[in-house]
Image (cartoon, rainbow, N blue to C red):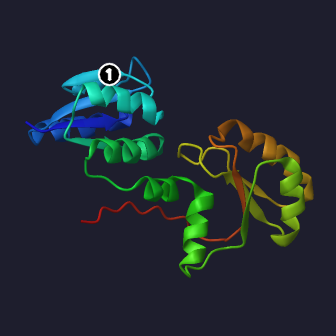
Amino acid sequence: MKKIAVLGAGFYNIQVYKELRNAGYYALAIDGNENAPAAPFANEFKHLNFSDPNTLLEFLTQNPVDAIMPINDWGTVSAAIVSKSLGLRGITPEAALAATDKGIMRDCWKNNGIPNPKYFVFSTLNELKEGIQNIGFPCVIKPTDSGGSGRGISVLQGIEDLEWAFDFAKPFVRNNRMICEGFVNGTELTVEAITV
């Protein structure tokens, strides 16, 4: 039976474990919450901070699996790094960073000729104040990597919004980087895709 380490065991992940087990896989749930709601639906559960690739690698070196499946942004980079280290199939760490860090993502798009709104990456309020002159208003600021779920995003209408928006985003920043980008009015779409 193939053993899959699934990174994330929140309430919304319960169906993932049901489907994996119904398909004949051994599902190892890994989550930083020792009372993870989806844990009872897995074959096995490990309380572990999977967003730290070194911790995850140490555990999976001692507990081999056939695949690592991140089911949210928190585990994407760790899964890529550890999969590469263990010789498992997976996306590259570079692809994982480009998929989860909005600054790197925008740079990839720009370098490959894909249209973008104007943007810049910053770490301090002073850098935001300096760079905002090239973007104008309205604009959006957000962490480049917040772990997902739209944490810390603000639409700024004028210069008076800079400080509160910076302070609002800061607690959700995982890598000391934020992004400011031009506001594009329209319907927001999220597209999940798997390619083989």
Name the residue rendered at 18%, 25% in the picture.
43
Q: Which residue is mark 1?
A: 46
Give the farthest residue toward the right. Answer: 160
Residue 161 visible in rendering: no
Q: Position of residue 154 (x, y in %)?
A: 72, 52
Q: Is residue 164 above or below residue 43?
A: below
138 left or right, relative to 69: right
Q: Is residue 160 visible?
A: yes
Q: Amino acid at mark 1?
A: Lys
Numbered disc 1: secondary structure: strand
User: Residue placed farthest to the bottom in the image?
Assistant: 113
- Residue 24: which quarter of the image? top left
* Left or right: 84 in relation to 63: right
Picture quadrant of residue 34: top left
Work out whether residue 145 or residue 151 is closer to the camera in this orientation and state it: 145
Q: Give the answer, above or below, for where 90 lies relative to 146.
A: below
Crowding around mark 1 (Cα neighbors within 10 Å: few <14, some 14 to 19, many 20+) is: some
Left of 89 or right of it: where is 138? right
Residue at screen point 24% across, 29% down: 28
Q: Nearer the viewer, residue 169 or 157?
A: 169
Q: Is residue 69 found left or right of 2 in the rendered image?
A: right
**The residue positioned farthest toward the top in the image shown:** 34
Residue occupying the point 89% across, 51% down: 126
Quadrant where the C terminus sits is bottom left
Instruction: Please tell me whether residue 72 is drawn above or below residue 59 in the rendered image.
Output: below
x, y (%) of residue 156?
Answer: 80, 58
Total labels drawn: 1
Q: Position of residue 110 (x, y in %)?
A: 60, 75
Q: Which quarter of the rendering shows the N terminus? A: top left
